[in-house]
Image: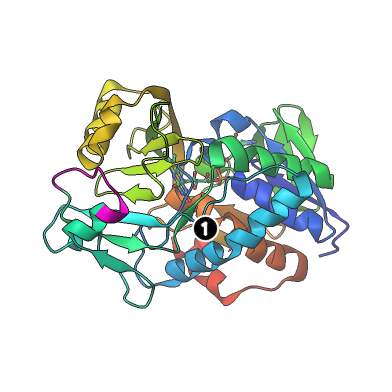
């Protein structure tokens, strides 16, 4: 398509924003329609870049995730140089402590990638203070994290604005107007908006606009803060446990996640959710029991039946799909932006896209 014609992105979470930046850098005219950035899963996530700790089996999904993890250093540097703001990318590695004697509960799904088993003593040398039930664990040195909640989200918005993306916050798409397999316009709360091409990136709400099997999987999270009495950070890598993960930020904030609930769009924090998070986290790292609590929050992962994203062309000729990133949307933002920009602007379909096409459902 002509790179000067207007592309309208529905949804201003990390997927919509990363696409907007990529398309704009390649010369396209881009508008982003965002109902409410505060509700985006992008603000909620733990920010783990964790294809190995997530134990994704060898598959096109693992290839997609690894390609995205490889893009992360350069992608975040680019956003930082556009804005002069941090993204909070930290190649801290991820430690996956195990409770089973053989470590199978956190064992790697492939032997081809760098990972190391640490026995009872070795894991405590790397991470003092682990719970007594931890028998050892796997060390994934190339997994990483980004501070999505306080840095990446804001930096992505600012990068889009700095580059001249037309970012319309508070605009809700209520209907996709169609004629003969084409979008003719978007009905919004501020009237009809038209472009020449459209990209659907509305996260967990995607199934409300189009007949796509994307549904919300709620996650509750909380954060604690390392007390001032500590001279140095007691945790310098992510702990990816069996039922919990603990993500330390560089300034002493520690994120604890996450529940995984099939309750639709049911907002709020629940006592059961928080109890589960705290019990699992304290079992893994008992010192947390004395750390002051900072904040609670929740959000909705965009889940699909096979837990894989929906990427590529759609039943409508002028609509491209970039949704359903489930629990890996922060990780997958750079590769999604690249592959979808290649597809939309140059009609180049990376072979990997075939595995994530909507027609598989
Ligand atoms: C508890 C939790 C922990 C997570 N941890 C991680 C992690 O550690 N690592 C990782 O990689 N991923 C993680 N994720 C997943 C990740 O957050 C998501 O996959 C990712 O944020 C999806 O991005 P998105 O842009 O598609 O959707 P979102 O970030 O949800 O953004 C969608 C946007 O679309 C807007 N929108 C929706 N409907 C409309 C409409 N009709 N009109 C206009 N705008 C609309 C919404 O307002 C929202 O701003 C986690 C998610 C949760 C909930």
Which residue carries the number 1 mark? 310
Is 279 displayed left or right of 188 in the figure? left
The residue depicted at 37 percent of the width and 44 percent of the height is 235
Whether residue 55 is in magenta: the answer is no
- Which quadrant of the view contains residue 154? top right
Left or right, 206 with reference to 248:
right
Give left or right: position of 127 versus 345. left
Vertical order, 350 against 86 (above or below)? below
Direction front: furthest residue: 231
Report x, y in % for residue 305: 38, 53
- Whether the residue carrying mark 1 lies under 8 Å from ligand 1 is answered with no
The image shows residue 307 at horizontal and vertical percentages of: 40, 55
| Span highlighted in magenta in the image | 125-133
Q: Is residue 174 visible?
A: yes
Q: Position of residue 178 (x, y in %)?
A: 69, 47
Q: Quadrant of the N terminus?
A: bottom right
Q: Is residue 296 above or below residue 91?
A: above
- Identify the residue at horizontal 75%, vertical 47% (top origin): 8
Which quadrant of the view contains residue 123? bottom left
Q: Is residue 126 magenta?
A: yes
């Amino acid at each position: 398509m002509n790179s000067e014609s207007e592309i309208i992105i529905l949804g201003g979470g990390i997927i919509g924003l990363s696409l907007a930046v990529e398309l704009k850098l390649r010369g396209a005219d881009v508008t982003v329609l965002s109902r409410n950035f505060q509700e985006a899963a992008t603000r909620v996530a733990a920010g783990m870049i964790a294809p190995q700790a997530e134990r994704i089996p060898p598959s096109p999904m693992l290839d997609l995730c690894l390609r995205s993890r490889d893009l992360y250093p350069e992608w975040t540097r680019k956003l930082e140089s556009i804005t002069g703001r941090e993204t909070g990318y930290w190649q801290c590695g991820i430690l996956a402590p195990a409770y089973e004697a053989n470590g199978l509960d956190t064992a790697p799904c492939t032997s081809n990638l760098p990972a190391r088993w640490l026995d009872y003593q070795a894991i405590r040398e790397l991470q003092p203070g682990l719970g007594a039930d931890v028998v050892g664990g796997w060390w994934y040195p190339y997994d990483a994290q980004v501070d999505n909640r306080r840095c990446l989200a804001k930096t992505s918005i600012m990068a889009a604005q700095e580059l001249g993306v037309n970012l319309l916050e508070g605009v809700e798409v209520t209907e996709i107007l169609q004629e003969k397999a084409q979008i003719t316009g978007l009905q919004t709360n501020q009237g009809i908006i038209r472009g020449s091409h459209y990209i659907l990136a509305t996260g967990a709400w995607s199934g409300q606009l189009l007949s796509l099997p994307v549904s919300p999987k709620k996650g509750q999270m909380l954060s604690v803060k390392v007390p001032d009495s500590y001279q140095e950070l007691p945790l310098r890598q992510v702990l990816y446990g069996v039922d919990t993960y603990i993500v330390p930020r560089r300034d002493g904030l520690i994120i604890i996640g996450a529940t995984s609930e099939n309750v639709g769009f049911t907002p709020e924090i629940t006592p059961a959710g928080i109890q589960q998070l705290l019990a699992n986290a304290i079992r893994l790292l008992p010192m947390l029991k004395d750390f002051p609590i900072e904040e609670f929050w929740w959000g909705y992962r965009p889940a699909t039946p096979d837990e894989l994203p929906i990427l590529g062309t759609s039943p409508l000729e002028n609509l491209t799909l970039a949704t359903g990133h489930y629990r890996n949307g922060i990780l997958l933002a750079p590769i999604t932006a690249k592959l979808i920009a290649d597809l939309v602007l140059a009609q180049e379909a990376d072979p990997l896209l075939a595995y994530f096409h909507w027609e598989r459902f």
